[in-house]
Image: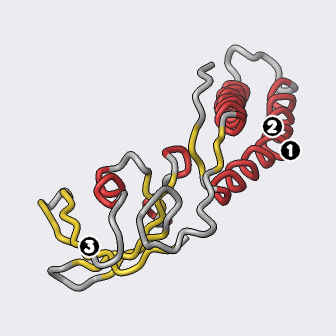
Amino acid sequence: MATEQIPMTASGFERLSKELDHLRSFERPKVIQEIAEARSHGDLRENAEYHAAREKQSLIEGRIAELEDKLSRANIVKHDSDKDGIVRFGAYVTLSDEESGDEKSYQIVGDLEADLAAGRLSMSSPIAKALMGRKVDDLVEIQVPKGKREFVITEVKY
């Protein structure tokens, strides 16, 4: 396993720790019970329930191993006193679309905790890269699937 540290927000670390606890304490015992029940049905060669449960177990164990590795290498980045309005890792950024006036808010997070639907942008995404180091009232040009769009940073908080 690699030893490089993985930047993560405190809330992301907590979220992933809860997922790991859930997998260990609920999902793992549940799938073990499913395997035991499927074994009791007899011939394992033609037992679809058994094979499905074993595959599910493999996915759960793989996710547990991945989370254990990532969490053990997590570097929790904190910006408690950043009041300069500059976008850094962990920042909550509100953008206003210059063309439509629509506002969108994102948090810049590590790759492992990114979830666009929840407004968490990976720090390695093109949007986050364009925002890093910028400050409130900066005009930022971002390449999106529909072409280049201009946004104004209206708020940065931590």
Can you give x and y, in whole percent of width and height, for residue 27 in the image? 78, 43
Image location of residue 39, percent across then percent down: 83, 24
Q: How far apart are marks 2 and 3 (CA)?
A: 48 Å
Asked if 107 appears above or below 126 in the picture, the reply is below
User: Quadrant of the rendered structure where residue 88 is?
Assistant: bottom left
Q: Note whether residue 60 is visible.
A: no
Q: Residue under label 2, please give it.
A: 28
Circle 3: residue type: Asp
As helix, strand or loop, the secondary structure at mark 1 comes to helix
N-term mark: 1 or 3: 1
Residue 44, x across and y down, in percent:
75, 17
Q: Residue at x 62, y 58 (%)?
A: 78
Look at the image and tell me in which quarter the N terminus lies: top right
Query: Could you tell whether 10 is left or right of 126 in the image?
Result: right
Give the quadrant of the C terminus.
Answer: bottom right
Q: Earlier in the sequence, mark 2 or mark 3?
A: 2
- Assess whether mark 2 and mark 1 are in contact (beta carbons under 8 angstroms): yes
Q: How many residues crowd around disc 2 within 10 Å: few (fewer than 14), some, or many (20 or more)?
A: some
Q: Name the residue under label 1.
A: 25
Cα distance in 3D space between marks 1 and 3: 47 Å
- Name the kind of residue labelled 2 in the image: Arg
Q: Is residue 100 left or right of residue 51?
A: left
Point out the frontmost of discs 1 and 3.
3
**Where 22 sits versus 81, above or below?**
above
Which secondary structure lies at badge 2?
helix
Residue 130 x, y percent position in the rendering: 28, 56
- Which residue was labeled with disc 3? 138
Judged left or right of residue 6, residue 123 is: left
Q: Which residue is drawn at 32% across and 75% down?
A: 153
Disc sitting over residue 42 in the figure: none
Mark 3 Cα shell of 10 Å, populated few (<14), some (14-19), many (≥20): few
Give the structural element (helix, strand or loop) at label 3.
Answer: loop
